[in-house]
Image: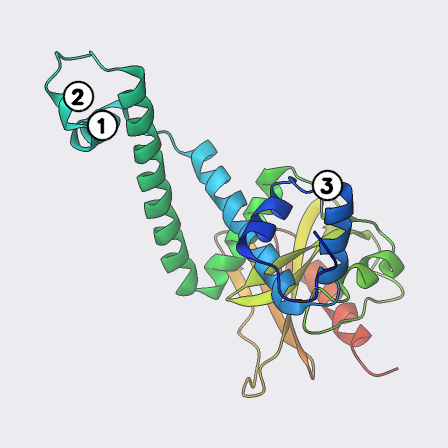
Amino acid sequence: MTHINAHLGYDQVSAFIDGELSPKETSEVEEHLANCHPCAIRILSATQLKAATRHVSERFVVPPEALSRLTAQLSPEASKKPAGVYTLRSWTWGALAASLILAVSLLGWHATRQSGSLAAELLDQHLAVLSGGSPPEVISSDRHTVKPWFQGKLPFSFNLPDALPAGTTLNGGDLTFLHGQPAALLRFNIGRHQASVFFTQRSRDESEPATSGIQSGFVIQYANTHDLRITAVSDVNPSDLARLMSVLVEAQSPR
């Protein structure tokens, strides 16, 4: 791979997220992504799709009777065999087809549900953080490390406060999407509770932020600045989350 002047191709995106590039090629792609927002979004989208498919396959098990039906439909010859007699090849392709059909169906249902409710999407992403156990993409409690990591990866910038409320710590951050928009997901601890805070670009026709409240036992709070929407979700006391939101909003003021 030579120096990248155009956008990444499909094979390059696939090889990059699968870790199949050489160190030199990986370095070239990373350099390109730092200066090409469209390609950075493509990489992020492909990575999230891969992660979502993996989570679906880990979370759901195909019922044996459904697998048998799909195998019989996809392999007519197998349906003529005595019950319980399948070749390894026919079983493998049947299982693969069943898994793919189930994954696509579940992902389609999940996307439909998310598109109808910002609150549901917020809860999904926060619960994924709580249950996933994976560390942030950038691991640091230092705002001077976390903020620069997002530069070039998002079509907007944001500030982090000099000091956080007592008992609150920054754990790091991730690139993500929220309601179809690229977003910065910052992870905080407030005491023993985890909080997910999303920064997205505010649309020009957006007036007041959505109404804050509690859904499914989680506190969801919204705030708008001149250029940004800040959204937080946690199971912490609402007043504690409000203090964090207040300092985050204040940090966006011109200095």
Circles 3 and 1: CB distance less than 8 Å? Answer: no
From the image, tell me which residue sits under label 2: 78
Q: Nearer the viewer, residue 85 or 169?
A: 85
Which circle's residue, 2 or 1, is located before the other in the chain? 1
Percent across and percent down for residue 149 are 79, 59
Q: Amino acid at mark 1?
A: Thr
Q: Nearer the viewer, residue 233 or 38?
A: 38
Q: Nearer the viewer, residue 141 or 32?
A: 32
Residue 101 position (above or below residue 164): above
Residue 113 position (above or below residue 159): above
Q: CA distance from mark 2 to mark 1?
A: 8 Å
- Picture residue at 69% right of the left edge, 46% below the top: 193
* For residue 88, side relative to residue 79 (left or right): right
Q: Quick one: label 3, few (<14), some, or many (20+) residues within 10 Å?
A: few
Q: Quadrant of residue 15?
A: top right
Circles 3 and 2: CB distance less than 8 Å? Answer: no
Percent across and percent down for residue 108 are 36, 53
Q: Nearer the viewer, residue 248 or 73?
A: 73
Q: Amino acid at mark 3?
A: Ser
From the image, tell me which residue sits under label 3: 22
Numbered disc 2: secondary structure: helix
* For residue 51, side relative to residue 1 (left or right): left
Which circle's residue, 3 or 1, is located before the other in the chain? 3
Residue 180: image tag:
none
Circles 2 and 1: CB distance less than 8 Å? Answer: yes
Numbered disc 1: secondary structure: helix
- Picture residue at 88% right of the left edge, 82% below the top: 255
Q: Nearer the viewer, mark 3 or mark 2?
A: 3
Q: CA distance from mark 3 to mark 1?
A: 39 Å
Percent across and percent down for residue 37 are 66, 68
From the image, tell me which residue sits under label 1: 71
